[in-house]
Image (spheres, grey):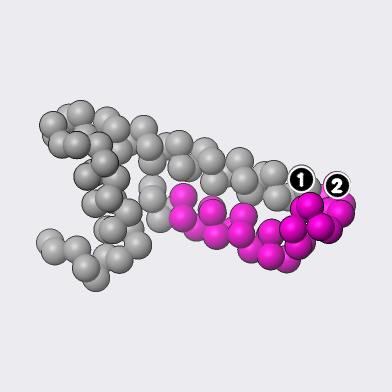
Amino acid sequence: MQRAADKAYTAVEQLQDQYGPPTQTEWTDEQRASWEAAWQAWRDRADDVQVAVTDHAKEQGTPRHQVEVDVKKAARHPDLVAD
């Protein structure tokens, strides 16, 4: 889930890089719609991660922050996570 959210965020960043800053470059309606769809996809995935992290933390009796740190570490740096 975290990897999907990270990938979706990368898509948002790539579109922003491609289109230029919206405050400095006038985007076409198509560009704006494309960026908004990518942004919504990222937000939906990020929201799903947050719900899952919260639920897991409650189930395990673990501080939510620690679960979030562990999830991000496992998703972004799997080589650093012990089995």
Question: Could you tell me what secondary structure mostly forms the magenta stretch?
Answer: helix
Q: Residues within 10 Å of mark 1 (few under 14, many from 20)?
A: few
Pointer 2 residue? 29
Type of amino acid at the residue the image marks with label 1 = Ala
Q: Secondary structure at mark 1?
A: helix
Question: For the residues marked 1 and 2, what is the alpha-carbon distance in whole angstroms?
Answer: 6 Å
In the depicted view, which residue is nearer to us: 39 or 24?
A: 24
**Stretch of the chain drawn in magenta:** 5-31
Image point (46%, 50%), residue name = 5
Q: Residues within 10 Å of mark 2 (few under 14, many from 20)?
A: few
Pointer 1 residue? 33
Image point (53%, 41%), residue name = 43
Instruction: Give the x, y percent position of residue 63.
Output: 19, 37
Instruction: Give the x, y percent position of residue 40.
Output: 61, 41
| Image quarter of residue 26 | bottom right
Say whether residue 13 is left or right of residue 81.
right
Instruction: Give the x, y percent position of residue 58.
Output: 20, 29
Q: Secondary structure at mark 2?
A: helix
Image point (35%, 62%), residue name = 76
Instruction: Give the x, y percent position of residue 59.
Output: 17, 30
The reply to whether the magenta stretch includes residue 27 is yes
Quarter of the image containing the C terminus? bottom left
Whether pointer 1 and pointer 2 mark residues with C-beta atoms closer than 8 Å, the reply is: yes
| Image quarter of residue 49 | top left
Say whether residue 35 is left or right of residue 67.
right
Type of amino acid at the residue the image marks with label 2 = Asp
Compared with 17, 28 (above or below) is above
